Image (cartoon, helix red, strand yellow):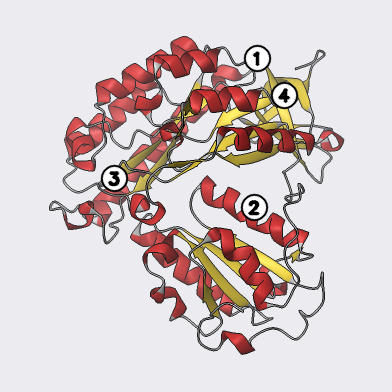
């Protein structure tokens, strides 16, 4: 048995002694890469006979941590304490970026806490702990929603070293999944019923494996025959003319990109260590829209970076207005110890950060409403992902709008052509139309 945290060797629940009786729950914090890694761990454990259960039924709780901000670390500690208090007195396995940087801070939270920095070893560690047999390999059923949309991790690590970000220290340098492995995984996902594949990674634009680039990844995944192909997030300078050409020539690529902005002020972008100016960002988005008609663009924006002035905050608002995003994800700056920004002068008062964030969120809601209004009365293809109790189906358009389709509960996993309408509650409705997607 692997070395355990103090006291863990005697903490195996008595009721977890047979194949199939082990109840495992997951808490995944942070990015989509963490989510896909948790799904892979879950698949291995399901293959070993474990059951996925809620926290209050779990014999083991696996917490996949995020450490991107100080606030994220606090959420992880809270999640560990919550898991330790669950009724079955579960073993709590903690993995992920937070563990990679500071393992002792979590092992000190309790004797039932097991630290495993290597995510590839988590499933094996759990089966060792609870005397289940060796894992038997991946299976394709990965839980609710898997039939329609699957995340495919193609890359890990980052070397951008933005001043506010701890991820390069936690994840390491960029590393790419071999192209043939990606192609094989994509075919397996399609064979398992996935209708949309989302390419994920910490910085997917940094994909390089031999002579292969992200453009080759797009072409390889598209060759699997998947109906839809989407990128989780891509940096603006990676939207090169060649890459945009490949996207424009790949029919399965969704007309939606998530491109992090962070700030519309050149001074703040420089202090952050972002490698573009506001003008360069706007130019790359314009080039993307020229290459991909009907493109919807969403973004991340940070408020309150050290030294940010009222004029800098206004510049961000103005750039968001001129670019015309379809949605904003607004974050308040939170100092992360170990990053250059944590020791920078010019810290902004929390109340000022909160006010700037509230203003940006309100503006983001208006941008989103404008985007929705521009689509009312138009046709769209909705990939139905879940069924609701009222017999309707809930799904996503190619440009990433959430739509409810009345009477479509039995059509989960299908793409339906609909006319977009606005419901009485302000939500988007899809009225089925004739014709295939």
Please say whether residue 370 is visible from this viewpoint. Answer: no
Whether label 1 touches label 4, CB < 8 Å: no
Which quadrant does the C terminus fall into? Answer: top right
Q: Find the distance from the CA under tag 2 to the CA under tag 1.
A: 36 Å
Task: For label 1, count other residues whose C-alpha is less than 10 Å away and answer few (under 14), some (14-19) or many (20+).
Answer: few
The quarter of the rendered structure image containing the N terminus is: bottom right
Pointer 4: residues within 10 angstroms few (<14), some, or many (20+)? some
Secondary structure state at the residue bearing disc 3: loop
In the picture, measured across the screen, residue 356 lies left or right of residue 22, that is left
Q: Earlier in the sequence, mark 3 or mark 2?
A: 2
Q: Nearer the viewer, residue 282 or 4?
A: 4
Residue bearing mark 1: 378
The spot of residue 209 in percent (x, y) is 47, 33
Residue matched to label 2: 39
Q: Secondary structure at mark 2?
A: helix
Point out the residue furthest to the right here: 410
User: Pointer 4: what residue?
Assistant: 225
Q: Residue at x 80, y 32 (%)?
A: 406
The vertical placement of 174 against 316, above or below, is below
Pointer 3 local density, CA inside 10 Å: few below 14, some 14–19, many at least 20 = some
Determine the CA span between mark 3 and mark 1. 42 Å
Residue 301 position, x and y percent, is 35, 38
Judged by depth in the image, the label closer to the viewer, 1 or 4, is: 4
Q: Single out the mark in the foreground, 3 or 1.
A: 3
Q: Position of residue 186 (x, y in %)?
A: 67, 34
Q: Which residue is mark 3?
A: 161
Q: Relative to residue 148, is residue 249 depicted above or below?
A: above
């Amino acid at each position: 048995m692997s070395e355990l945290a103090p006291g863990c060797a005697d903490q195996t629940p008595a009721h977890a002694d047979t194949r199939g009786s082990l109840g495992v729950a997951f808490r995944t914090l942070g990015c989509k890469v963490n989510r896909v890694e948790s799904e892979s761990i879950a698949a291995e454990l399901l293959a070993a006979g474990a059951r996925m259960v809620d926290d209050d039924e779990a014999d083991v709780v696996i917490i996949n941590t995020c450490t991107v901000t100080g606030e994220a670390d606090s959420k992880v500690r809270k999640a560990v304490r919550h898991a330790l208090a669950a009724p079955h007195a579960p073993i709590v396995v903690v993995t992920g970026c937070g563990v990679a940087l500071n393992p002792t801070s979590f092992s000190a939270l309790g004797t039932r806490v097991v630290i495993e920095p290597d995510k590839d070893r988590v499933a094996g560690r759990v089966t060792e702990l609870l005397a289940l047999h060796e894992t038997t390999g991946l299976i394709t059923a990965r839980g609710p929603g898997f039939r329609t949309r699957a995340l495919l991790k193609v890359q890990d690590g980052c070397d951008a070293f933005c001043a506010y970000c701890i991820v390069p220290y936690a994840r390491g340098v960029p590393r790419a999944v071999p192209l043939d492995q990606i192609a094989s995984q994509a075919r397996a996902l399609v064979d398992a019923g996935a209708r949309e594949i989302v390419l994920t990674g910490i910085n997917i634009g940094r994909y390089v494996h031999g002579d292969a680039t992200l453009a080759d990844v797009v072409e390889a995944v598209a060759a699997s025959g998947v109906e839809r192909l989407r990128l989780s997030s891509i940096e603006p300078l990676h939207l090169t003319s060649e890459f945009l050409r490949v996207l424009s020539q790949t029919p399965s690529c969704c007309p939606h990109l998530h491109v992090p902005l962070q700030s519309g002020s050149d001074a703040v972008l420089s202090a952050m260590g972002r490698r573009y100016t506001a003008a360069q960002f706007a130019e790359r988005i314009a080039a993307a829209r020229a290459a991909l008609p009907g493109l919807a663009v969403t973004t991340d924006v940070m408020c309150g970076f050290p030294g940010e002035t009222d004029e800098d905050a206004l510049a961000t608002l103005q750039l968001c207005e001129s670019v015309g995003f379809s949605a904003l994800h607004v974050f308040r700056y939170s100092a992360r110890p170990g990053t250059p920004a944590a020791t920078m002068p010019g810290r902004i008062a929390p109340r000022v950060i909160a006010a700037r964030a509230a203003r940006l969120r309100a503006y983001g809601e208006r941008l989103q409403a404008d985007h929705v209004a521009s689509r009312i009365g138009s046709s769209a293809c909705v990939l139905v992902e879940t069924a609701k109790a009222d017999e309707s189906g809930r799904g996503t358009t190619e440009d990433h709008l959430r739509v409810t389709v009345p009477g479509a509960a039995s059509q989960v996993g299908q793409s339906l052509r609909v006319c977009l309408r606005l419901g009485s509650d302000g939500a988007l409705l899809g009225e089925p139309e004739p014709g295939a997607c």
